[in-house]
Each structure stands twice: as C-alpha cells, then as structure tokens.
Amino acid sequence: MKAVLALDLDQTLIFSARSAEPLGGAETVWVEDYLGEPLSLMTARAYQLLASLSERQHVVPVTTRTPEQLGRVRLPGRQPYAICANGGILLQQGIRDADWDARVADELSGSEPAPAVAARIGLVAGEPWVKTFRQVEDLFVYVVACARDVIPDGWLQELEGWAASHGWTVSVQGRKVYVVPTALSKGAAAQRVAGLLGGPLLAAGDSLLDRDLLEAAVAAARPRHGELHRVDYQRPDLFVSKASGAKATEEILAWLDERAGLLTG
C-alpha cells in the first residue's frame, strides 16, 4: 500500500524567486517558465526529495491553477492524478473526471453563481492597481494586483463581508485575491483520489484555501509562511516547518516521507 500525498503547489512546493527567500545560498531548480522567462523554482534538495517520494508514494499536486497553468510546471517523477481549480477539476492522466465535474456542479448549485460574483468583483477591473481580472469557468474568480501593498484594505474587508454573505470566501496570496465558493473543496477532491488509490491521505498547504485539504488528511504539514501561518492554524498531527520560503519545502517533504512510511508500514 502507498500513501496519497496531496500537496499544494504555489508557496508550498514551488515559489517565485521573490517568495522563495530566504534561501541561504541553497541551489535551486527552475520548474516553470512563462512567456520565455523563468517563473517558479524549488530548491535542488526539495526537487530531489519530491522525485524520491514520487517513486515510493502517490504524489498528487493540488492547486487553484487551471489545468493549462498547471501544465507549465515541470515536477519530478510521475503524478497520474492532479487536482486543479481549488478542487473543482480532477485530472487523471491529464483527462478531466466527468463524474467529478457533475458532482461539483451539483454542490455549487446552492451558491451564488460565479457570473454574479464576477460582475460584483469586476467593478474594480479598471482600477489602476488591478493587473488582471478573471473568472475560471463557473468555479471561482480572481484579481491580480500590480503589487500586494496597493490592494486597498477597505476593498478587501468589504469584499470578505460580501463574499461570506453569499456563500463564498476570500483568500489573499501575495498580489492575488481569490474569491471561491465555500462549497468548492480541495479536501473533498483529495479524499476522492485517496479512495481511488486506496491509501492514507497526507497533505501540505499554506493558504486558507488549503485548510479543508489539511483537515481531510490523517496527517498534515504547513510552512512557516502564508495565510495559515498568519492565523496560527493548528490541528492534531500537524507539522510546521522551522524555515520559511522554499527551504520550508525541504522540511515538509522529509516529514511527509517519514509519516507516510510509518502509516504504510
């Protein structure tokens, strides 16, 4: 039996050069390019640890990215399953699980429709601090600001209150503001994969959107950065790295390796 390791992607496994710090001189490996330029990296040790883990356990990337955005990332080893769009899309060998699509659509039927949420949030699309505004299918909406410190605090607070009253939640990750239905769940998608593969579920993540993923697992880890660290998120059998940035991934993968070994005998 193999364990199923559901691992959040951005700011947990991979990092921009800026968010990767402090690296302490660690060697790095670029794992994503965009428009011909390097975009995301891992430390060389984390890359090697992930490659080794992928040989012994089932590694499942979990992300708020679309399948197309995930496709840019070059992770070591094989990952037959992947969870995209914050749990809204389940991929097996790169093919969408139609049954999961139907289940998600049913669960979201009780939430405010994504186009209505997009219309509300799109009111700021023309503001000078907004770089990108996008609705991802009927699943969620996000805004990319020019920088984190230019996002108006008053707008964020108002948005959080409005979203909560309409069955949605807000997550701020760097300069990106995600607005996601509370019914959309990384944890539920990870449990489905664990059921298909028949192994215990372990997980790692850094943001509020990863909370239900960590709570769905029998053991979980988070880095010493991100939204979960800022709210001091805790749960039984939770590992918190001593390092922050990309170095935290090394600790998290080593701990998951040990825990997976104990759980699978």
Image (cartoon, rainbow, N blue to C red):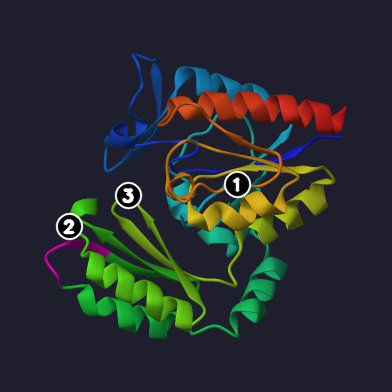
**Depth-wise, is mark 3 or mark 1 nearer the camera?**
1
Q: Residue furthest left?
A: 128
**Percent x, y of residue 147:** 20, 52
Q: CA distance from mark 3 to mark 1?
A: 22 Å
Q: Which residue is mark 2?
A: 150
**Between disc 2 and disc 1, whose residue precedes?**
2
Residue pictured at 79% horizontal, 26% vertical: 261
Residue pictured at 39% horizontal, 77% vertical: 161
Relative height, residue 182 to residue 117 (above, below): above
Q: Which residue is mark 3?
A: 174
Q: Amino acid at mark 2?
A: Val
Disc 3 secondary structure class = loop
Q: Quadrant of the N terminus?
A: top right
Q: Tell whether label 3 touches label 2 (CB within 8 Å).
A: no
**Depth-wise, is mark 2 or mark 1 nearer the camera?**
1
Residue pictured at 14% horizontal, 70% vertical: 127
> Which mark identifies residue 35?
none
- Whether 111 is among the magenta residues is no
Q: Tell whether label 1 touches label 3 (CB within 8 Å).
A: no
Q: CA distance from mark 2 to mark 1?
A: 30 Å
**Between disc 3 and disc 1, whose residue precedes?**
3
Q: CA distance from mark 2 to mark 3?
A: 11 Å
Q: Which residues are magenta?
A: 127-132
Q: Quadrant of residue 104?
A: bottom right
Disc 1 secondary structure class = loop
Q: Amino acid at mark 3?
A: Gly
Q: Amino acid at mark 1?
A: Gln
